[in-house]
Image: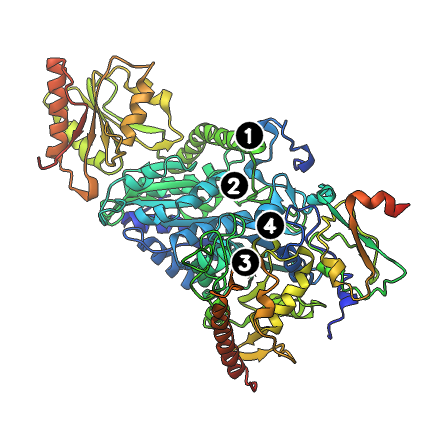
Amino acid sequence: MSKKAKEMTPETPWKEITPGGAIYEAGNAEGYRTGDWRSMRPVWIEEKCTQCMLCPPTCPDTAIPVKESKRLDFDYDHCKGCGVCVKACPFDAIGFIKEQDKEEQEV
Amino acid sequence: MAYNLKQVMNKPDRLTGGHRMCAGCGAPVTVRTVLRALQPEHRAVCGAATGCLEVSTFLYPYTAWKDSFIHSAFENAGATVSGVEAAYSALKRKGKINDTYKFIAFGGDGGTYDIGLQSLSGAMERGHDMVYVCYDNEAYMNTGIQRSSGTPKYADTTTSPQGTVLPGKMQFKKDLTGVMIAHKLPYVAQSTLTANFKDLYEKSEKAIYTKGPAFLNVMAPCPRGWRYNTPDLMEICKLAVDTCMWPLYEVENGVWKLNYKPKKKLPVIEYLKPQGRFKHLFTNENKHLIDDIQEDIDRRWKDLLEKCGENF
Amino acid sequence: MSIRERLSGNEAVAVAMRQINPDVVAAFPITPSTEIPQYFSQFVSNGQVQTEFVAVESEHSAMSACVGAQAAGSRTMTATSANGLALMWEVLYIAAAMKLPITMSCVNRALSGPLNIHNDHSDSMGARDSGWVQLYSETNQEAYDNLIQAIRIGEHKDVMLPVMVCQDGFITSHAVENIELLEDDKVKAFIGEYKPEHYLLNPEEQIAIGPLDLPAHCFEHKREQAQSMINAKKVIMEVAKEYEKLSGRKYDYFEEYKLKDAELAIVIINSTAGTAKTVVDSLREKGVKAGLLKIRVFRPFPEEEIAEALKHIKVLAIMDKAESFSAVGGPLGAEIKSALYGRAEGIKVVNFIYGLGGRDVKANDIDKVYSELLEILKTGKVKETYRYLGIRE
């Protein structure tokens, strides 16, 4: 029975820690939210988006999910607000606002 | 099969979000594209040298790698992954493994051009069936932007700072791709992040699926160390290619091929202007140094065109 | 039915490796261990083993490739000496921390500088804090037996640590002596298959190893690693007992030679013990109660057992074929003295540095040691505790 990564906390005693610092669950970083790093926020303007797919590969954080050759809305749990996708979009279909202004945008 | 971005983006991501790389970093964009070239049913073991990529993607207890991953030290990504590949050969021969595994080592320019050069050279020379991808961000970024042999001439770094007497790094950038080509490997290529990622994707596919050792040198800009406006990652890469600072080419079994010839070759000043690490070159005392850079780039470009059988 | 042969220490180790038939061997040549990868690569060339031999370009890469291969799920071995061991220094620590049971032959040779290819123990002593299990061998027989046992010790689930088996360069590695080998199938049955729980090439479970480990977790990882070394002590004895049944040869943490009723004794490592035993014999004939303790297991350090074996001794000389440049003695000296503290404090102890850079050690030299111990016994005065044997003053 492999020891679970989420059980490895700063309280885990040495007898329960994974030997050698190994982790037995691939890609578990997905559970770590880097979205709170943001000070800027990309906004997907769906009406303008032609689904050209030029933005998803530019994301360092895999924060533009893709399904059946179409991009979906941003994964704000992981998006760090770098703005690379904003600049990469040829159709101005991604807005870029201050993170603190996001409530106003939603209204 | 012709490259189709929309199709290719359906392939599963093998590097997850939730890693700690800086916002806008070129390295994870590189890794995502390289891994995307794997066929989904094939397995991989990835290795990384100590550096930005490694410490940020595998910080205990989180790993952003969906494939098995190993890190051991700074200068031995080549040797470590060659050991994994040797184990695969041995176990496959004994009938203990049936799955197809591919082996990909990642290293920054620090762990590849400099301290890791020996281990890379050895691994490539021995002919292991593996790929080594260098994400070249042109300095030892993880430890605070110190110069590497991959740092371009006159760039400001923390161990080659621009000052009143010296204008930054005094040596030209090492041609590591050339060094690896001299190893006479089945496949060596230079790439970066282009708009539809066709260049890097196809080269990754070739590198992974060519039998034997392959080397990819990918320019991966660092917004912190290069001091450009973070969202401009793709634009910086485009300028690097259009000014011929970083040409896109490949050498497949000794045959040189230029992958991109800019319709309009831009002067290097266009590439240097948006980056803070070259800001000091834009003074009256220093602007002649830009000519120095231009001359070197032109010479290398001409040389490359000749090797690729292209006209200047 | 064992096989009688005449082999050098290097040949004996190479034969053991052939019988073990590891999955991967990654090695770089360095005198005097060079012959080991040479013999082994001949076995590979002739198809006598099914090993993937990786002719790496440096010792650092040798250990790195071993780390990669072992982590991938294969049984991996290598061999080196002196500066080769020093060059792989950081990776030794990494291999132990990553809990990888790599096995290595360390053919002891002096660490530079100056450059010297002859025997002393500065190399393996320098690696004593790396987390590797360390076994020392007086003869080709012990080197052979230790290497086979090393596989079982390292791969035991309570240990999972790398093991180095040491023997003296040139003196043991290149000298041909009689030896009894086990049959191939007996070795194969004894070591079994390598079955790690977690490994890179497991299609059922993808793992990540070698993390960046911040202060919140690193300490616990190191404690876990320390426990493995503690566990190794018991495992070493279990394996030795099993090996005894197979070979008829008995192994312990150390060898006691005419020690039980001795008044004067020396503690020593590797081949010089052989010379010393003949000196003990002639002293015994003269009525001197001389004895000897020869260390086999240095890591983990069997403190209690050593103290128990020595507690009745009146005057003790600890023989170090390495300097620790502590200005007070050598590495073995420090460890033995700390073992005696609180357990056998009445003993008068002297630490001799000897044989550095392959300086020949003859029976006369060992005889001198015992004479000095006799002097201390008679006068009750220890005088200098940090001495050099056979140096030209």
Callout 4: helix, strand or loop?
strand
Q: Which mark is residue B252?
A: none
Question: For the residues tagged 4 and 1, is the chain the same?
Answer: no
Amino acid at circle 4: Phe
**Residue that appears at 33% across and 56% down:** C29
Q: What amino acid is labelled 2 in the image? A: Met
For label 3, the SS is helix
| Residue where numbered disc 2 is placed | C98
Residue furthest to the bottom in view is B311
Q: Tell me, yes or no, if residue C282 can be seen here.
A: yes
Q: Let me know if marks 1 and 2 both belong to one chain.
A: yes
- Percent from the top left, x then y, of residue B136? 55, 60
Location of residue C70 in the rendering, given as x and y in whole percent from the top left corner: 51, 48
Mark 3 or 2: the one toward you: 3
Cβ atoms under marks 3 and 4 closer than 8 Å: no
Q: Chain of mark 1?
A: C
Q: Which residue is mark 3?
A: B277
- The residue beneath circle 1 is C220
The answer to whether the residue labelled 3 contacts the one labelled 2, judged by CB atoms less than 8 Å apart, is no
**Alpha carbon distance from label 1 to label 2:** 13 Å
Give the amino acid at mark 1. Answer: Glu
- Label 1 in the same subunit as label 3: no
Please tell me which of labels 1 and 2 falls first in the chain: 2
Residue C388 left/right relative to B302: left
Q: Secondary structure at mark 1?
A: helix
Q: Please state which of residues C87 and B275 is positioned toward the viewer in this rendering.
A: B275
Q: Residues within 10 Å of mark 2 (few under 14, many from 20)?
A: many
